Image: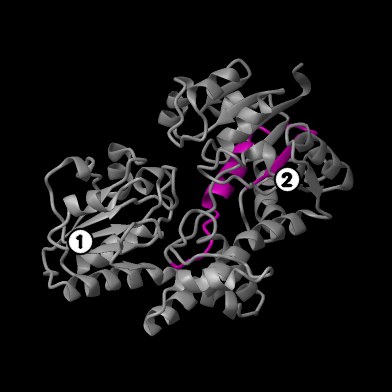
Amino acid sequence: MINKDFHICIIGLGYVGLPLAAAFAEQYNVVGFDINKSRIQELKNGYDRTLELDEAQIKAVSSRLQYTSEIADLRSSNIYIVTVPTPIDQSNRPDLTPLIKSSQTVGSVLKEGDIVIYESTVYPGVTEEVCVPELEKASGMLFNTDFFCGYSPERINPGDKEHTVKKILKVTSGSTPEIAQKVDNLYKSIITAGTHIASSIKVAEASKVIENTQRDVNIALINELALIFDAMGIDTNEVIEAAATKWNFIKLNPGLVGGHCIGVDPYYLTFKAEELGYKPNLILGARQINNGMSKFIAEKTIKCMIDHDRKVKNARVLVLGVTFKENCPDMRNTKVLDIIDELKDFGCKVDIYDPWVDPSEEKHHYTIEIIPNPFESNIQYDAIILAVAHDQFKILTDADYRKISLDDPVIIDVKGIVPNPTWRL
């Protein structure tokens, strides 16, 4: 039975917004808004380029989920949920432009009694100090008198078909105790894993930004250990396996830290901390270590090539995988591109193969070219870098790598899945 009390509008139909819209559309009438008109048309045709939803899932809610890029179509809604990106600029400072523009859009259609809920990751205070003034200015109404706000941090894990939006516990909050309960009840109606009401919007904002900051710091420790053990000639993965025999050791693996969350969110917290006069040395140090791993991997590749008497200038190098994580097409903030740039600086000719990436789409956005499956060609490479652990790469054999390698293969294994690598992180 469809709930007719709430008319929900989701602002932003990306990795977060679309699955959320589909989940709500199982019980409510939903409008999905995005400024990307081609994205809207694709969804109307039943295609999700993020691959978070398949055609059957989109079709199942098609009668209750309207896709639009027209602001006028939002006016019938009374619950607005903002799920736009919150990126950083070239100086690693928060770029709140998408959030501000979305607030202006919502403000232009706000009515008395409406609730605006933000899911985008921010530093504590953004909802009430940045977004609310934009809502008031665009609507001409007063916060907590005419309209209200909530914050419920997104917890989408791109490419994860097990921990989907309804199966991940949701933190909720509201601008008044009554609104907090209303927001919580709304999410509780679709989130089977349950909800947790935070005492304030700022607490909810802070809870989100530290989730990924903690992960970033933990991975940075493992990455730093990998750098130390590599200098000692010790296999980091063997060390981790040995240490993990103790029950309270947290088992993590070294690697690249990209994506829209872990590699970005800590900068929101450090920005606010420094604004308040506190220098977050540990968090910034972790960011520096993780950002330096691409350069380290590229330099190890060059060293291994030299050790195998391979030329460096004009050497052909194959990079397997360019997304920020396995089994998804998401390339946001992928650190594999940094490896490629470093190799090109050494004069290498780099080919990129990723079966999850739409070549035409990513060539448009990232000015890179994805080649067809190299294992079905006669090309031979001076070195191969396994950068992303897609399932398609896990089944590759030693013979597969030898087929496309010059003489004795030079294989750099970033993810620990190659049968006989020359070097692994």
Side of 104 where 329 appears, left or right: left
Separation of disc 2 and disc 1 at Cα? 47 Å
Query: How many marks are shown on the rendered structure?
Result: 2
Rendered position, 81 above or below 31: below
Asked whether residue 49 is in view, the answer is: yes
Q: Secondary structure at mark 1?
A: loop
* Residue 202: x %, y % from top left: 75, 58
Side of 375 where 100 appears, left or right: right
Q: Residue furthest bottom?
A: 232
Highlighted range, magenta: 91-119
Q: Amino acid at mark 2?
A: Lys
Side of 151 where 324 appears, left or right: left
Q: Which mark is residue 170?
A: 2
What is the quadrant of residue 292 in the picture?
bottom left
Toward the viewer: 139 or 40? 40
* Residue 359: x %, y % from top left: 28, 40
Q: Amino acid at mark 1?
A: Pro
Q: Which residue has dot 1 on it?
A: 409
